[in-house]
Image (cartoon, helix red, strand yellow):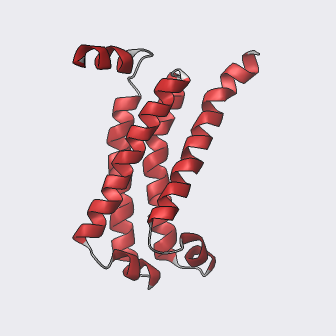
Amino acid sequence: MMILQTILPMLSGIAAVLGFMALYVWLTKHDEQKLINENNSAAAIAYVGVMVGYALPVMGLVLNTLPNDEFLMWSLVAAVFQLIVYIGYRKVLPRLNKRIEQGEVAPALQMAGFAIVVGMLNFAVTVHLKPGHILAALQTLG
């Protein structure tokens, strides 16, 4: 039982990252895996940047071994922040998806950088969470 309690947060983290990346791939207008298979560096850079940017706050959640409901809630908050980065950056660079498809590395690298920075800031929040913080915060709002 001790082993399961030890690896459960890690398994939850892996599931959260895989779920988020599936959502991200669904939202993008280009097929990342196809582009990566074609050796498109821009697609790989953008994809890995978003994955690392999301995995950072999830790492904070794993370190805190929060209860499942709080883990899920905070992992969704991290997902929203990453999607805001992607959608916002797409508005700043309206042709972002086409540029990635064409293999332009600079916009992909910049987007990856934004995703990682937001992930780092989100990690700074999640690493200090304690079980019950979110519930207590929600109760003060009500």
**From the viewer's perspective, is residue 11 above or below residue 85?**
above
Q: Residue at x 34, y 73 (%)?
A: 107
Q: Position of residue 57 (x, y in %)?
A: 43, 38
| Total marks in image | 0
Residue closest to the far bottom: 102
Image quadrant where residue 37 sits: bottom right
Of residue 121 and residue 9, the one placed in the foreground of this image is 9
Q: Position of residue 84 (x, y in %)?
A: 31, 53
Q: Residue at x 23, y 19 (%)?
A: 141
Q: Position of residue 30 (x, y in %)?
A: 48, 75
Q: Residue at x 35, y 64 (%)?
A: 111
**From the viewer's perspective, is residue 3 above or below residue 34?**
above
Q: Quadrant of the C terminus?
A: top left
Q: Residue at x 50, y 25 (%)?
A: 69
Residue 142 located left or right of residue 5: left
Image quadrant where residue 34 sits: bottom right
Residue 6 located left or right of residue 103: right
Q: Quadrant of the N terminus?
A: top right
Residue closest to the far front: 142
Image quadrant where residue 129 sits: top left
**From the viewer's perspective, is residue 10 above or below residue 106?**
above
Q: Position of residue 116 (x, y in %)?
A: 38, 52
**From the viewer's perspective, is residue 82 above or below residue 70?**
below
